[in-house]
């Protein structure tokens, strides 16, 4: 997400590096380049103009002209205004004040609303320790309620049993009664066009009956600037409290996130970043602003790592490193953990200074090579994984045939494993102080 905007922004600021001073005409050119980058990322023209006017006023006010480090100062100014535009801080769903707390999910058909409801339910259960019940009032789309039931199973939450022929408001009444034993009731409404007066009135009736603590508008990030009119129409019909942007992993532009927040005045609560039930990211304006400007997002990277690697696994790996042990089982485990954290491109974007590397490399090819490496390791016997020294010529031929790769590919993997093993042994000999110093030099937080 935001790949194209991040690339353009980083290129603009890179062009300023090394300049002793910045003339007024240089500043105007920079602002024109930023405006083009914003428009290409689907940010609305009025918002782009307003944003740049504020940036210019701040730049002049901080005496950017003739500054000795214009690139650093203008990055800071743009960063601060991006945070203001996106909302100063992250948003937490208001589900603690009443029980059950009702959360109504609204949006266009095909916006990812049903999947988004299940993802948020899973998030509330695992992160917020909430007991969640999901109910679907979508009686119009074929198998919509059955879909929610399946997604509810994946999320590990209960769903309201389906009664055929039941009207939406009757479903809400039954759900409210059943939800007395739960902390949160999530109501997935039917997808509706904002110009469909009948369905918009139905949504208003559902809201009036359920008295929700939260009304979440789920929007497809790939909708582009058309999303503005949709969001404004929903905001007029019902009192929206927050936004969720789905399919952020599929949209390299991401300008909708900037425009929707400004158009509706509603905070962005979550970003949908994939198809799995766990592919949901809480929205933090400062982190996203850093990624847009190529500054990385180490905090989110650490959180992703913690979500896929248990404390016990981390301790066990540390013990193995201390003993200088690193076999193919460890290599396979690390590869799978990395894959569970997301694509290589998304991970590179979170590491300060490496955001541009994903533009220079073929990340899809890198992901493919990782899958091929996994196939080679899986073709080995348990003994061979534990002791690579066993891999003689005949064993390599067997492994190559079993994985659909060549013997040369097997030899390359053996060389890579040897290099990684030597590096791990070096790390294992480092004390805690040296490891902390290395982490700080790489830009990781203290601790």
Image (cartoon, grey):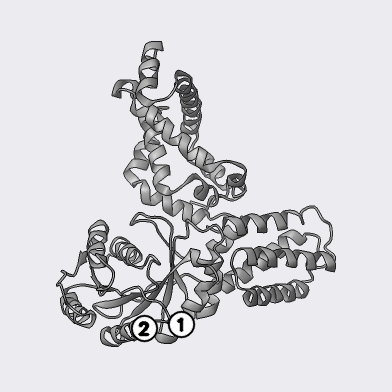
Q: Is residue 117 visible?
A: yes
Answer few, some or many: residues within 10 Å of disc 2's Cα (few below 14, many 20 plus, some between 14 and 19): many
Residue topped by disc 2:
200
Task: Please tell me whether mark 1 sits on a helix, a strand or a loop.
Answer: helix
Q: Residue at x 66, y 57 (%)?
A: 8
The relative height of residue 244 versus residue 410 in the rendered view (above or below) is below
* Residue 252 occupies quadrant: bottom right
Answer few, some or many: residues within 10 Å of disc 1's Cα (few below 14, many 20 plus, some between 14 and 19): some
Q: Is residue 300 left or right of residue 354?
A: left
Residue 92 at x, y percent in the picture: 40, 72
Q: Is residue 175 left or right of residue 412?
A: left
Q: Nearer the viewer, residue 306 or 269?
A: 269
The relative height of residue 87 versus residue 211 in the rendered view (above or below) is above
* Residue 165 occupies quadrant: bottom left
The relative height of residue 348 versus residue 260 in the rendered view (above or below) is above
Residue 302 at x, y percent in the picture: 46, 51
Q: Which mark is residue 145?
A: none
Residue 126 at x, y percent in the picture: 30, 60
Q: Is residue 68 left or right of residue 101?
A: right
Task: Please tell me whether mark 2 sits on a helix, a strand or a loop.
Answer: helix
Q: How many marks?
A: 2
Residue topped by disc 1:
233
Residue 115 at x, y percent in the picture: 33, 63
The relative height of residue 144 versus residue 312 in the rendered view (above or below) is below
Mark earlier in primary sequence (2, 1): 2
Q: Residue at x 39, y 73 (%)?
A: 107
| Marks 2 and 1 in Cβ contact (< 8 Å) | yes
Q: CA distance from mark 2 to mark 1?
A: 10 Å
Q: Is residue 245 left or right of residue 349?
A: left
Q: Is residue 88 visible?
A: no
Q: Nearer the viewer, residue 193 or 417?
A: 193
Q: Residue at x 72, y 64 (%)?
A: 74
């Amino acid at each position: 997400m935001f790949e194209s905007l991040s690339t353009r922004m980083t290129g603009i600021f890179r062009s300023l590096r090394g300049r002793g001073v910045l003339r007024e005409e240089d500043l105007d050119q920079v602002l024109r380049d930023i405006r083009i980058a914003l428009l290409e990322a689907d940010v609305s023209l009025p918002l782009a103009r307003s944003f740049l006017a504020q940036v210019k006023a701040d730049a002049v006010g901080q005496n950017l002209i003739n500054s000795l480090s214009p690139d650093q100062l203008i990055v800071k100014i743009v960063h601060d205004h991006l945070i203001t535009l996106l909302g100063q801080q992250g948003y937490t769903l208001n589900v603690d004040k009443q029980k059950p707390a009702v959360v109504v999910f609204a949006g266009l058909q095909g916006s990812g609303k049903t999947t988004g409801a299940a993802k948020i339910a899973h998030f509330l259960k695992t992160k917020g320790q909430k007991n969640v019940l999901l109910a679907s009032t979508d009686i119009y789309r074929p198998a919509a309620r059955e879909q929610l039931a399946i997604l509810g199973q994946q999320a590990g939450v209960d769903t309201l049993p389906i009664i055929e022929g039941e009207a939406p408001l009757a479903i809400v009444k039954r759900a409210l009664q059943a939800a007395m034993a739960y902390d949160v009731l999530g109501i997935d409404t039917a997808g509706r066009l904002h110009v469909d007066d009948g369905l918009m009135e139905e949504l208003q009736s559902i809201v009036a009956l359920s008295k929700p603590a939260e009304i979440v508008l789920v929007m497809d990030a790939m909708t582009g600037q058309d999303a503005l009119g949709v969001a404004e129409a929903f905001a007029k019909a019902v009192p929206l409290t927050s936004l969720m942007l789905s399919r952020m992993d599929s949209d390299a532009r991401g300008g909708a996130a900037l425009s929707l927040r400004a158009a509706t005045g509603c905070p962005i609560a979550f970003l949908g970043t994939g198809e799995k039930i766990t592919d949901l990211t809480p929205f933090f304006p400062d982190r996203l602003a850093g990624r847009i400007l190529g500054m990385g997002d180490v905090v989110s990277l650490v959180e992703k790592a913690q979500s896929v690697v248990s404390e016990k696994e981390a301790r066990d790996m540390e013990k193995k490193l201390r003993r200088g042990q690193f076999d193919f089982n460890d290599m396979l485990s690390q590869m799978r953990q990395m894959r569970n954290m997301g694509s290589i491109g998304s991970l590179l974007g979170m590491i300060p200074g490496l955001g541009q590397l994903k533009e220079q490399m073929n990340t899809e090819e890198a992901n493919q090579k990782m899958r091929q490496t996994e196939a080679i390791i899986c073709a080995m016997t348990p003994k061979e994984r534990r002791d690579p020294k066993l891999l003689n010529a005949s064993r390599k031929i067997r492994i190559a045939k079993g994985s659909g790769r060549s013997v040369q590919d097997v030899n390359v993997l053996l060389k890579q494993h040897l290099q990684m093993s030597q590096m791990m042994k070096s790390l294992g000999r480092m004390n805690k102080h040296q490891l902390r110093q290395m982490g700080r030099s790489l830009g990781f937080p203290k601790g």
